[in-house]
Amino acid sequence: MDSRLTILPEPLKNFVLGGLDPVADRFVRMGLRPNLLTAISVFVLLAASACYAVAELRWGAVLLLASGVLDLLDGKVARRGGMATQFGAFIDSTMDRLGEGMLFTGLAVYLIHTSGQRWPVVGLLLCFGTLTASFLVSYTRARAEGLGLDGRVGIATRAERLVLLAGPTLFFGAGPHGWLLLGILSFLFVSSVITVLQRIAAVHRQTHEPHHEAARAPGATPVVPAAVLKGS
C-alpha cells in the first residue's frame, strides 16, 4: 500500500485549502489572531460533542465540520499573516487532542443512553478504541518529527476522521438502530490502526537507511525541527 495515499484524495484537500485562502487573508486584514481561531474551533467542537451526546446528530455534524474549517483557518492565518510561532503550533495540537477526546466521549454517551441502539456496548468500545488509535496517529507523527524524521504518512489523518464522521451523520444520522454510526466507527478504528502501523513502518525504514545511520554516528548533531507541526 502506498504510504502517501490517503482516504480523501490530495487534489480534493488542496482544492478546499485553496478555497480558504481568501478567507484567511480577510481574517489577517481584520487582525484576528490564530490562537483566537484555535480557541473558537475548540469551543465549536465541544458544542458538537454535546449535540452528539444529546442525540442531535445532524447539528453535531454541522458543528463538527465548522470546527474543522476553523482549525484549517488558524494555521493559514498564522502562516499568511506571519504570526506562526512554536507555542501556537503546540497549543493548536494540544487543543485538537482535547476536542477529539470530547467528541468521542459525546458519541459514547449517545450510544449508551439513546434507546434503540443495537449494540451499545460495542459502540462504547469502538469509541474508546478509535479515540486511542487517533491519539496514536497524532503521537507517532509528533514523535517522528521530534526526532527529525518524516511522520506524515498514512491513510487516515485528522481530516479523514472528521469528514468521515460528520458527512454521513449529517445526512443520515446514526442509521437504523445505530448501524451506520457503528460502521463509521469501525472503519475509523481500522483505518486509524493502519495509519499508526504505516507510520511505525516509515520510521523503522528511515532509521535503518544507511545515510540515517551515518547521520547518527558519534559526534553528529541530530536533526530536530524548530517546531513540531500539529499532529494529524
Image: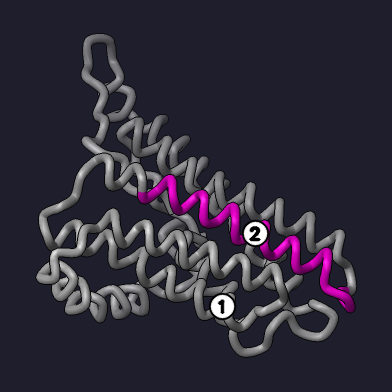
Which one is in front, 100 or 185?
A: 100
Residue topped by disc 1: 61
Q: What residue is rendered at 60% in x and 61% in y? A: 103
Q: Judge whether 71 appears above or below 214 on screen.
A: below
Q: Earlier in the sequence, mark 1 or mark 2?
A: 1
Q: What residue is rendered at 17% in x and 79% in y? A: 22
What is the residue that sits farthest to the top in this orientation?
218
Q: Specify the segment rendered in magenta.
A: 92-117
| Rendering coords of residue 112 (x, y %) | 83, 64
Q: Is residue 162 magenta?
A: no
Question: Is residue 79 among what the camera can see?
Answer: yes
| Rendering coords of residue 179 (x, y %) | 80, 78
Residue topped by disc 2: 104
Mark 1: amino acid: Ala
**Screen quadrant of the C terminus:** bottom left
Question: Which secondary structure is most common in the magenta stretch?
Answer: helix
Residue 4 figure quarter: bottom left
| Rendering coords of residue 59 (x, y %) | 58, 81
